[in-house]
Amino acid sequence: MIIKRYIVSNMNEAMTRIRYELGKDAVIISQRKIKKPGLMGFFSKKVIEVTAAVENNKKKEEDMTESIEAIKKLMKQDGTIDSADISVPKKEKVTILREKEVYKPESQAMQSKQVDLYKEMQEMKNMLGNILDKSQGLTETGVKSDLVSKLEDNDVNDKAIKKILSHMEIQGEDLEEKEKARYAIESMISESDVKMEGSVVLVGPTGVGKTTTIAKLAGRLSLLEKKKVGLITIDTYRIGAVEQLKTYADIMNIPFKVVFTIKEMEAAVEAMSDCDVILIDTTGRSSKNAMQISELRAFVEKVNTDNIHLVISCTTKNKDIDSIVEGYKQLKYNNVIITKLDETQSYGSIINILEIAKKPISFITTGQNVPDDIRKPSTKEISNLILGEDSIC
Ligand SMILES: Nc1nc2c(ncn2[C@@H]2O[C@H](COP(=O)(O)OP(=O)(O)OP(=O)(O)O)[C@@H](O)[C@H]2O)c(=O)[nH]1
Ligand SMILES: [Mg+2]
């Protein structure tokens, strides 16, 4: 919109000037009598101040048409631009010229850069694909290797398989695949060098064989190694649990105590201070029940020992291993005992358990016979089981 102010002596003069300058569409917005501006005007007679306005759309339209025409012209030209041909306002002209002159050569360069970049990305994608295939145990043709199939058959989980394969990657080329796998597995597990002396606590889920394992250990230590052994149980929860361990204590003729409260724990351990080893049995708890686990923790802390073993069955489902191993971590176990190896044909869970627990393996149990069915395993024995080279009958 154009707004203009006129100082005229009468309305006729105003109308003539407005029509001439602003066109017939102009309208008068205001009119008032004023004294002529300036010092001299103070003494002169009054004049009229008229304000008129007109929409400048038309002007805009004209500019637009001009601009469009200019752009059309430019689009038809491939090479240089004769700016003289372009009858657009100066501002637009400069912008258009810049776009045309600067962007065109750059877009060609950019295009070839993009092609190079695309090629590089494609190469990287192929390289990554190969690495991924190898780490997933796929052969060049994308088929699973025999080793991966064997590990899967043995219930080794994906995470452990990937780790085995990545350990194999860094081994010498001259080794056979099976040897590489064996070394890889052996480097992922460790034998515990814990001594069976002082207070030893066994914790773990229900029915994994804690009490039976305690009986086996007590038998071996007292009968074979001639050590003075004491037994304590805090499992007053399950009916028959106390009798179960007491029976073994009676047969082996070793001292036995039942602890009912956290307070009694310290006193019970103190009372057996003349023993070489005190084996402490605990209540089986679900790792999903945080309350029960922290209750157990209060008992275990009172024992004040760093000889704590997580007992877990080899038959535990892969999905449950995680929550058991993680759930029991608050009891600060520093060894793992894996039980019931005689009950399965696939031993992959051993490496799955140890891989999550990141603790050494102290014992494996291989049957219900007390005290025979327990032993310290070697890493070689475990790798043989996992690779299907051996089995527990
Ligand atoms: N096949 C086999 N059975 C075992 C083994 N160890 C223990 N058992 C059996 O597993 C069952 C449970 O054993 P327990 O020692 O009572 O298990 P627990 O962990 O003390 O159980 P809770 O006290 O209820 O938590 C019993 O029938 C044992 O004979 C083993 O190595 N192999
Ligand atoms: Mg028990």
Image: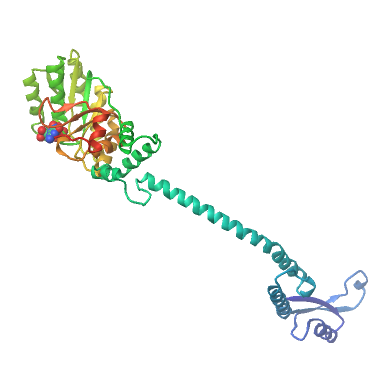
Front-most of residues 287 and 57 = 287
Front-most of residues 297 and 383 = 383
The single residue placed furthest to the front in the displayed view is 174
Task: Say above or below: 57 vs 334.
Answer: below
For this view, does 353 lie left or right of residue 245? right
User: How is the structure coloured here?
Assistant: rainbow
For this view, does 245 lie left or right of residue 359? left
Residue 229 sits in quarter: top left
**x%, y% of residue 93?**
75, 69
Task: Say above or below: 67 vs 207.
Answer: below
Residue visible at 87% across and 82% down in the picture: 9
Q: Quadrant of the N terminus?
A: bottom right
Task: Say above or below: 285 vs 63.
Answer: above
Residue visible at 28% across and 38% down in the picture: 352
Front-most of residues 192 and 95 = 192
**x%, y% of residue 304?**
27, 22
Front-most of residues 121 and 268 = 121
Task: Say above or below: 184 vs 72.
Answer: above
Tell me if I can see residue 323 in this picture.
yes
Q: Quadrant of the C terminus?
A: top left
Residue 364 sits in quarter: top left
**x%, y% of residue 284?**
18, 34
For this view, does 142 lie left or right of residue 348? right
**x%, y% of residue 47?**
86, 79
Tell me if I can see residue 294 in this picture.
no
For this view, does 274 lie left or right of residue 99? left
Task: Report the label total.
Answer: 0
Residue 174 sits in quarter: top left
Quadrant of the picture in which ligand 1 is shown: top left
